[in-house]
């Protein structure tokens, strides 16, 4: 009997000037050289740490770029770590001007369509944002996913909060209109940064997605709100297909480390996966530089000591503040130079 495969995937979709949307964390549109370089660099700490703790997993990188168009440092990394590169077109793209930000996010559903072709029912797939670091084996996550069909990250339950243009009560109204039935329990918002699915669940989502998306297109013409990003769609499908759980919350936390908002507490360093959206140009960049020099994790304890220091997990020290300030000045100069 064939042994089930545990897939770990992340992705990057390079936007053109015609389809570029805004990325608030980087302050740039998706077609900018800065966005491209940052997302190429963060693949290094992502794949290095995920491979280190998951040596048997099948690693995947999805992109609309050809393998030959990737920077040499990534090509070399993928060769060393046995990462499969899959060049995939974006067919689930929303209409132009659908929403101002993150319009590459529906690429997720192209990835699921592609994975539906290769996965068996008992294979598992983790799709993670690349601004994450893995600290431990994820075998427990894969086992739970294989048992339950999915492992989802419940992120927002505040019913008054507008989540990228829609509130949870509005999402429930959308659900009732779409499926002509009442929702069994109040919706929560599942973050799209960390999604684990069993093979048969991938196929169920692929079957349910087209009709939901077509309804969304029509619904948006008549209402002031709609499903603007991939996690909105995921949250609706999780309720419709009865996939709801909070299993991934045991494995990952979205850790904000900005001067304006910091939600990291002592003990958070023990999460198996750190999601670090603010650190793309900061702590993760410094880890990219470190790993570019050392090629691998040579000393586990020293590596995590530096990762904690660079990213401010669980606390932000004075050296990080200074380094972040210097990095910010350097990156601003580069940006001005590129624009001139």
Image: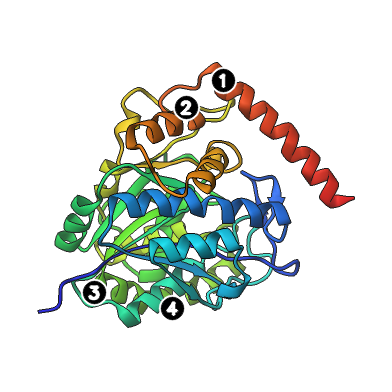
Horizontal and vertical percent position of residue 3 = 15, 72
Residue at the image point whose x is 17% and y is 55% from the top: 144
For label 4, the residue is 210
Give above or below for 134 relative to 256.
Answer: below
Res. 200 mark: 3
Q: Residues within 10 Å of mark 1 (few under 14, many from 20)?
A: few
The residue most toward the bottom is 117
Closer to us: 4 or 95: 4
Tell which circle, 2 or 4, labels the residue nearer the N-terminal end: 4
**SS label for mark 2:** helix
Horizontal and vertical percent position of residue 312 = 48, 27
Residue at the image point whose x is 31% and y is 26% from the top: 267
Residue at the image point whose x is 9% and y is 79% from the top: 1
> Pointers 2 and 1 in contact (CB under 8 A)?
yes
Tell which circle, 2 or 1, labels the residue nearer the N-terminal end: 2
Horizontal and vertical percent position of residue 77 = 48, 59
Residue at the image point whose x is 49% and y is 34% from the top: 256
State which quadrant residue 124 falls in: bottom left
Q: Residues within 10 Å of mark 2 (few under 14, many from 20)?
A: some
Closer to us: 270 or 256: 270
**SS label for mark 4:** helix
For label 2, the residue is 309
Q: Distance from label 3 to label 2 (Cα)?
A: 41 Å
Nearer mark to the viewer, of 3 and 2: 2
Horizontal and vertical percent position of residue 337 = 84, 46
Res. 319 mark: 1
Nearer mark to the viewer, of 4 and 3: 3
Tell which circle, 4 or 3, labels the residue nearer the N-terminal end: 3
Nearer mark to the viewer, of 2 and 4: 2
């Amino acid at each position: 009997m064939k042994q089930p495969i545990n897939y770990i995937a992340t992705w990057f979709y390079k936007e053109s000037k015609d389809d570029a949307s805004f990325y608030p964390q980087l302050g740039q549109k998706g077609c900018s050289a800065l966005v491209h370089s940052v997302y190429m660099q963060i693949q290094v700490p992502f794949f290095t740490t995920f491979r280190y703790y998951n040596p048997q997993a099948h690693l995947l990188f999805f992109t609309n770029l050809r393998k030959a168009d990737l920077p040499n440092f990534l090509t070399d990394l993928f060769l060393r770590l046995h990462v499969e590169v899959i060049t995939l077109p974006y067919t689930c793209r929303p209409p132009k001007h659908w929403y101002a930000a993150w319009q590459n996010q529906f690429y997720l559903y192209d990835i699921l369509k592609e994975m539906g072709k290769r996965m068996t029912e008992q294979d598992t797939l983790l799709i993670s944002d690349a601004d994450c670091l893995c600290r431990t084996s994820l075998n427990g996550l894969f086992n739970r996913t294989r048992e339950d069909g999915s492992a989802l990250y419940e992120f927002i339950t505040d019913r008054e909060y507008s989540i990228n243009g829609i509130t949870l009560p509005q999402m429930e109204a959308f659900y009732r209109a779409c499926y002509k039935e009442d929702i069994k329990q109040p919706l929560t918002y599942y973050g799209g940064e960390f999604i684990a699915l069993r093979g048969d669940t991938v196929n169920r989502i692929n079957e349910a997605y087209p009709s939901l998306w077509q309804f969304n297109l029509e619904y948006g013409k008549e209402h002031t709100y709609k499903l603007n990003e991939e996690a909105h769609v995921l949250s609706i499908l999780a309720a419709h297909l009865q996939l709801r759980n909070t299993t991934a919350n045991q494995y990952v936390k979205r850790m904000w480390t900005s001067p304006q908002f910091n939600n990291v507490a002592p003990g958070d360093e023990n999460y198996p996966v750190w999601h670090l959206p603010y650190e793309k140009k900061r702590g993760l960049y410094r880890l990219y530089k470190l790993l570019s020099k050392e090629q691998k994790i040579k000393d586990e304890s020293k590596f995590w000591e530096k990762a904690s220091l660079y990213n401010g997990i669980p606390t932000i020290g004075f050296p990080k503040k200074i380094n972040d300030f210097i990095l910010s000045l350097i990156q601003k100069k580069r940006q001005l130079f590129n624009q001139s």
